[in-house]
Amino acid sequence: MSILGTRVIRTEDPRLLTAGGIYVDDLREPELDGAARATFVRSTVAHALITGIDTSAALEQPGVIAVLTAADMTDLPPPPPAGEFDPDAPAVEGPLPLGGVWSEPLLAVDRVRFVGEPVAIVLTDSTYQGEDAAELVSVDYEQLPAVPSIEAALAAGSLLFPDAGTNVCQKGGQDTSDESIFDGCEVVVEGDIVNQRVACLPMEGRSTAAAFSGGKLTVWASTQNAQLSRLILTAIGLPPDAIRVVAPDVGGGFGAKIGVDRESIIVAWAAKHTGRPVRWVETRNENLLAMTQGRAQELHIKIGGSRDGHIKAYRLNVLQDTGAYARMSGFLPSLTVLMAPGVYDIPAVQADYKVVVTDGTPIAAYRGAGRPEAAATIERAVDWFAAEAGLDPARVRKLNFIKPGQFPFVTKTGAPYDSGEYEAALDKVLAKAGYEELRAEQRRRREAGAARQLGIGLASYVEVTAGDAGAGETCKIDVHSDGTATVYTGSSAHGQGHHTAFAMLVQAELGIPMDKVEVIHGDTDLIPDGVGTYASRSLQLGGSAVQKAALEVKDEAARQAAALFEAAEADVVLDADTGLWQVRGDPDKSLTWAQVASEAEGGTLMANVRFTQAMPTFPFGSQLSLVEVDTETGKVTLLRHVTCDDAGPVLNPVLMEGQRHGGIAQGAAQALCEEVLYDADGNPLTSTLADYGAITAAELPSFELVTSETPTHLNPLGVKGIGEAGTIGATPAVQNAVIDAVSHLGVRHIDMPLTPERVWTAIQSAGLRRHVREASAK
Amino acid sequence: MIPPAFTYRRASSADEAIALAAEYGDDAKYLAGGHSLLPLMKLRFAAPSVLIDLGRLPELSYIRDERTYVAIGALTRHHDVQHSPVLAAQIPLLAHTAGRVGDPQIRHRGTIGGSVAHGDAASDLPAALLALDATFVARGPSGTRSVQAAGFFKGIFETDLEPGELLTEIQVPKPAVPAAWSFQKFTKRAIDWAIVGVAVQGHAIALINMGTTPLRATAAEAALASGASIADAAALAAEGTSAGSDIHATKAFREHLARVLVKRALEEAGARS
């Protein structure tokens, strides 16, 4: 029986839970002996010109090796010249930062654009000396009016990049001016929805160590992809082959560790510039100030349809706050536009986006990256429409789903959905949750006028995974003469369980037991070519590459075995249960992998492959959230969360459930409590964990997971990505549940996070509107 | 996230601690559990040059039944207050409140005296002690004195303690009806400080985070004393308070919560007794 699909306990955990992982701060490589500690001097103001930097007092402190500013960066290659800026130019393909007038410097040159922007780097013998000395670096700022919000950016009273002449750095999508798409709609809802800025908040913050010797730079970085990091690090003026990047254990990334940030480039430069190894490990405070954040969209929606629930038209206008620098520019909102209509077959859809710069921390990918915003918005819009039409939200969803017979299905925004069973997924969730009974209990509480009301929230979602399927993923497998195997993957584990999953694939194909399979990732000397882990791509691309390499090794082994058996290659078979090679019809003779590999050249059987996929895949599902709302205080309690998340055949339920649990928790967190806030001057108000309301286990119930497996035809494993699905579904399910709990009081929408005060205020406002209506009717 | 350099002195007796405080003067701070002081130092909002560690003074960690009152050593950890059989029987409000402070790690480090001396209006225990009419015993170079809870909390992080004085004991009178208590703590997350909190013992009502210090809801108390219903008394809960607005709640919402929570607390205390 194949090991695939079984509950294999993570092989990573014994080490991580006992001896401890080796993160950048734990590395004791000889190259890092005597490494200086880096401490950044960060901007304390949101928007200002730098008129002077005085490092003299800091330089006199004990243990200070150097205090470096942009003025010291004379040994860097010049930045590319500023070209003509055209805001209407089509979006670049993929997450490329904008250059030209929008360029992001390494250390700030003459202007700062957000609180936390690196202005200088202090190198000391110890960490303690670093913070003391950094405090003594005196930076003179000539303050400029802050641009703390999308509204302020659009008003253009203050420009972050004066040479651009605007704060709008990109536009895209379709023409959304055609009002006639709503002609004949009996029910039309129009409104504004905020998808607030949130922190990515991995357990391990950013960290980088660098050593330069003999013309070669080695960088250890907490990253989701060593190979991309190497490419980014060429900014310090070294060719890729003079740089080695190693990703040791990485304590979470959630998108914010795709590649490396400017701080890591500065650390690498400082090591080369001073000749001394340098290590930087950010504090939680720095992490909340300067690690890229996510979401940060304001959306305008209009949705219309018939009174019996058929949706006929949907329009979405996205305003993306990209923060002080356009790290991903139009990429995130272009995904929001692509996924705008979600799981519905809507005859007319228009969506566009506009990206603005603000004095916020730069925005980049965060678990879902552009797709959660699309799902949260269409799912909110559908509920809003259903409430306005007086229809059950489950019924409206079913009426409008894309049907199984319609796949492959291309949406009006151009998304090519591969496969889906949307109604089946919703039905499974409704059955598991006991939807009708819950509605009955809700009716009882409403009729009794109870202080604590029940809310039932639905979200049916589809998302796109492995968006860059064509880039694929690499894998090399060596089977050694002792019968063990080594897997070199271009994918990059940072908590997901790659080592377990990939070893399972090798065992399934080759019969080499998992404990004889070593999986290696994240070292550009060993794996120069690789793509990494993001966009829920690891199993479908990285896993398919492992399988492809295993099959190639098997072919090679079959040739060797045939020679040893003196049999025809076609007669040689591998028993994948025992890992023994045999000749068909002769059960008495067999060869082990060790015997076969020993005969190969150099005693190693080897395959080196790249797996690419023709198109992305589109996992889907439905989630139901049950909440209780205390209408006297607005406090929300999450009681149950039931989900059916379909990402194709499940390789290992333990790993899949882990992805869903974490994802649902993060999705619920955005709905209920998390938000990065700034004051009117652009000062961050949530730069410690006491102020940033990260969700904890105490706020969450045990999740109820239902299984559904609809394969894709796009890869041999039939799998899609599961890493981001939980988050994408959970946010709107929880938000819809809270609004559902108070909809009978006249509430139609509440923006996230659904804090007690927001919920209570919404109830009060709805009550006031009702009174006014009743009074004016008399 | 690293405090500026400081000198660390560990006291081996309360008298030694007081002598060290006298020696270093204004530059010194007492360190008990450290859960309020150390975060402020890490953010460099506080920078005492000397810390006098009280952590190993068993003489200040006790819970004693003194017939009319319970005496609690200032260095008694929240966990020990929470699980004290004496308090569970005699003053359940205090045992319960100690169990609502922070999380288990915090309750094993934090001390009742540290919480009182820090004087944070958002802390749970000062309000409970205010509702219980506790007395605080302070020892300084010139001797020992007692201060009523009602006169102890002076302003933002400001108490009646003189520089160098050490809070040594908290004396809590046994309530006439121990069961007539309620503690309502309104938070977004279990771990948070109260957005608003209410401690009720009998007809005494103390409010958390409704001003610069823990407060008694005097208008509501007076209404109850003159025979008003719980609902009518609770409607006065925010009278005389001075709640602030911050990222967690506006002043108006805090006032609303005070009214709702006082009503719930009085109903619960009434139902228990």
Image (cartoon, grey):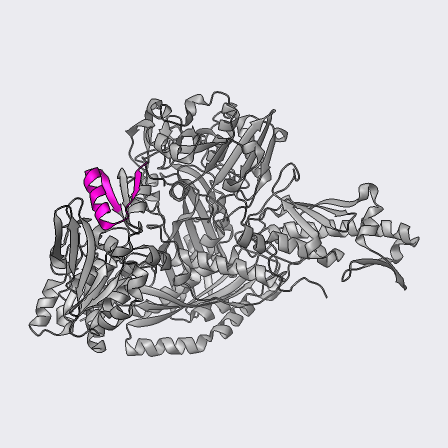
Residue A561 as seen in the image, left or right of residue B254: right
Q: Can I make out residue B150 in this image? A: yes
Q: Is residue A158 magenta?
A: no
Q: Residue at x 56, y 69 (%)?
A: A424
**Residue farthest left in this picture:** B226
Q: Is residue B8 magenta?
A: yes
Please determine whether, in this image, residue A2 is positioned above or below residue A537: below
- Residue A220 drawn at (x, y percent): 55, 37
- Residue A188 drawn at (x, y percent): 38, 61
Please determine whether, in this image, residue A700 is positioned above or below residue A59: below
For this rendering, which residue is in front, A403 or A228?
Answer: A228
Q: Quadrant of the C terminus of chain A?
A: bottom left
Residue B48 as seen in the image, left or right of residue A500: left
Q: Quadrant of the N terminus of chain A?
A: bottom right
**Residue farthest right in this picture:** A566
Q: Can I make out residue A185 in this image? A: no
The boundaries of the magenta stretch are: B4-30
